[in-house]
Amino acid sequence: MAEYKRPKSLMPMATGYCPGCLHALATRLVADVIDELGQAENAINVVSVGCSALNLYSWCGDVIGSAHGRAPAVATGVKRCLPERLVFTYQGDGDLAAIGLAEIMSAANRGENFTVVFANNQTYGMTGGQMAPTTLLGQKTTTSRDGRDCLTTGYPMKMCELISVLEAPVFVARYALNTPKGVMDAKKGIKKAFEKQLRGEGFTFIELLTNCPTNWGMNPLDTLEYMNTNTIPYFTPGVFKDKEAEK
Amino acid sequence: MEKRFMKGCEAIAEAAVRGGCRFFAGYPITPQNEIPEYLSWRLPEVGGAFVQGESEVASINMVYGAAATGKRALTSSSGPGISLKAEGISYLASAQLPAVIVNISRGGPGLGSIQPAQSDYLQATKALGHGGFRAMVFAPATLQEAVDLTYNAWDYAERYRNPVMILMDGCLGAIMEEVELPEMKNSNPEDIEDWCLDRIGDRTDSHMITPILPEPALELLNKGKAMQYKMWEMLDTKVEEFMLEDAEYVVVAYGIAARVAKEAILRLREEGYKVGMVRPITLYPFPKASLNNLDYTKVKGVIDIEMTIPAQMREDIELQVKDRCPVHEYGRSGGMLLDDEGVYEAIAEIVKGGE
């Protein structure tokens, strides 16, 4: 039976995430993979703004905080100067798909040799549950009280699909963290992305579908079912690009 | 020392490389394009990295990432682009990262004009970004001075773990002069190894670079910085005092305006008028003492000459003059250049009118 231990890359402290939040699980998966690859001292975590910024305090390897949306630009500067280090950003959907759209698309298009871990919970968690670019149609938020309306706010943005049409990225995949299988698949995906980076293959992008019990106004268990019936049908999990498999 | 006849922007780009710069990110904007163009081929020659960013915003954040690794990092732009970099410059200050930002300034406000102007003094010296921080601002008047200030800029940035700005207008960026280029140098590892993300030596602990801090820690940082700014004033103020001994009128001008003003002063001296000049080389820290310590029993007027309207340095001057004599201003703006005749006449009118 597997032993459940704190990953080396995480501080012996509470993460600060709300009870039932899958951000905590996502962070843990990344830390586990880094441990397994023996990269705890070689990794640099480029933290973004939003709930993901809690990583600044719970991460115990090298960590650098970025401005909102700018983590891929910061990671570009870090990786170009320290090409041997394992560099990754950890970003939420407001950070990555709204204010940081230029930075993520451009870093992906340049084929920067780092990994982006994108936690998509369809809301701005830290600021209190405003509508995100990824908020589902009809989903109620503090800035879309009657539910998101495509006529005035457009449609939930599918980042894996957008990034996978670029030439440079080598691995683009989406996983849902609401089932044990999804969690195990996600871990394999993160590992594959980091291994590709360590081999210098290029830009890798991992989207993790997560929840927000606090701002969705649901108990954690209900969010998992909500993800099954609402999130996953729109944000289809899967591998969108794998340059190795294309060969 | 190697001598070369170089264009302003290229001279500071080469001086940056020799000063240890190994990372540049920037976005095209006139009149500073020769800096990224030069560094795009020059940095790879010395093992450095050049990235053409997708925006000014991204570029300054790339510099933030590069600076965190302990590499000497540079970005350059002009007025509108510096506004976009304001966010990142504030983050550099907050995370205490050394980096150098060059502003080859042009007419403003707005998209303004692509012609030279000195319209970014207030932005550079008072608020390069949100949150209340300062950065040293170097304002060269010749290309040799631009080379020397750029070459040494990272020494200051690393010593104080703070961004440094080099502010020069589009004239200086475009003119050609002979410059002496210094030898290659690097940062002193001792200045960076205790905080940067690079694992210099056998470091086993991890490092956090953060632009956000718990409130008591942030207040502590701000108090420390306030003391540091005072220290800059005492240790690092640079100024040229020109013909001040017997001066009855004192021109205050920096950069290109000071060059034009100097010609006018020499002409007025030939005519027998006692005119001198205070030329701030550091706009921040401002050379307060040079103006505060003038002999106001002799000085009848101070004249602020800037290539911008309204004059932006005037408040800093008035704070030192303290109503002990009148303060006048003359300038051109919007990309319209100061010329010898206009500056001579503006100064002469005040000087001769005072008789």
Image (cartoon, grey):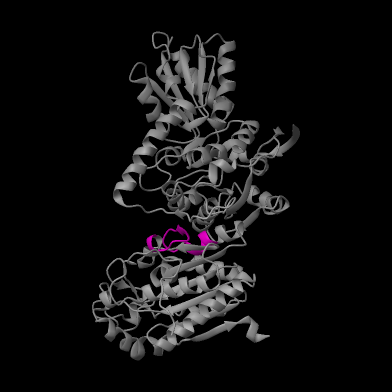
Magenta range? A57-75
Q: Nearer the viewer, residue B180 or A54?
A: A54
Q: Position of residue B7 (x, y in %)?
A: 68, 40
| Image coordinates for residue B209, horizontal then vertical, percent | 45, 53
User: How many numbered circles are shown?
Assistant: 0
Quarter residue A37 falls in:
bottom right
Q: Quadrant of the N terminus of chain A?
A: bottom left
Whether residue B304 is situated above or below residue B334 in the rendered picture: above
Whether A66 is among the magenta residues is yes
Residue B136 shown in magenta: no
- Can residue B104 be seen at all in this image of the molecule? no
Q: In this orientation, which residue lies closer to the viewer: B214 or A70?
A: B214
Q: In the displayed structure, does residue B124 sit left or right of residue B53?
A: left
Residue B154 in percent (x, y) is at 56, 40
Q: Quadrant of residue B266?
A: top right
Instruction: Answer above or below: position of B173 versus B201.
Output: above
Q: In the rendering, at what x and y percent does residue B199 appear?
A: 57, 54
Q: Specify whether residue A75 is in view.
A: yes
- Side (left or right) of B25 relative to A185: right
Q: What residue is rendered at 52% in x and 52% in y?
A: B68
The correct choice, above or below, for A65 with respect to B238 in the image is: below
Residue closer to the observer: B263 or A40: A40
Q: Residue at x 47, y 18 (%)?
A: B250
- In the picture provided, is B277 more to the left or to the right than B48? left
Quarter in which the C terminus of chain A is drawn: bottom right
